[in-house]
Image (spheres, helix red, strand yellow):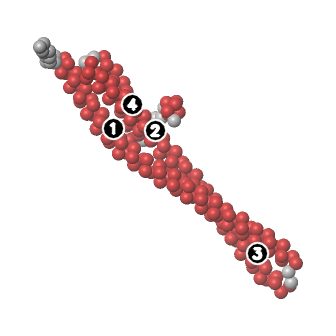
Amino acid sequence: MDTVETTDSPSTPAESKLNTWVAITVALLATFTGICQIKDNNIGQAMQQAQADKIDHWAFYQARNLREEVARATTTELRLSFASAAASADPAMAEAIRKYDALADEQAIKKEALMRQAQQDQSTYDALNYRDDQFDLSDALVALAISLLALTALTQKKWLYLLALVPTGLGVFMGLAGLLGWQVHPEAIVQLLT
């Protein structure tokens, strides 16, 4: 029987050094991604809250709108009835008209306030989404970098390690932009991915 001998050649100092750099880079990227993920999760929760607030405010806006319309319709009915009412009903009709006019005006004012709140909720959501996009792009770039680093470890090609540093740098930059609130947003890439 023939036996196949396998000999693992000891890695050269250059390979060992490259593997060390790959390992350090992956460890730093994993740590950085973990920190970014915490902030991104918090932003995601805030986005959900802003969206829920917007929906609540628009629903309440619609309720106020309905109340206003009912009050205005009631006022119209009372005014029409007032013209044909007996003289003894005049003070009561006038008071009812005044009450429903005031109610309609109050609902219109409250409705406008709710509309402004709902629009502010949308602005809050959009601002948070801007930062969420930064973290999403950072995640994608770091994942690409880690894949290239894995290939580097397998192939021992130094040029591949240098190539991996490009998405590494861009991923860290986008992550820092999200963490620090920088106004950096590659619109074309985000539009392509959404």
Instruction: Quote the CA–CA distance across marks 4 and 2.
Output: 12 Å
Give the amino acid at mark 2: Asp
Q: Residues within 10 Å of mark 1 (few under 14, many from 20)?
A: many
Give the amino acid at mark 3: Ile
Q: Which one is in front, 115 or 63?
A: 63
Q: Earlier in the sequence, mark 2 or mark 3?
A: 3
Instruction: Quote the CA–CA distance across marks 3 and 4.
Output: 66 Å
Q: State the SS at label 3.
A: helix
Q: Residue at x 59, y 59 (%)?
A: 59
Q: Earlier in the sequence, mark 3 or mark 1?
A: 1
Q: Residue at x 40, y 33 (%)?
A: 140
| Residue 169 % position (x, y) | 35, 28
Front label number (2 vs 3)? 2
| Residue 116 % position (x, y) | 59, 55
Q: Earlier in the sequence, mark 1 or mark 2?
A: 1
Q: Earlier in the sequence, mark 1 or mark 4?
A: 1
Q: Is residue 62 visible?
A: yes
Residue that numbered label 4 is attached to: 141
Point out which mark residue 133 bears. Answer: 2
Identify whether 166 is placed above or below 99. above
Instruction: Quote the CA–CA distance across marks 2 and 3.
Output: 53 Å
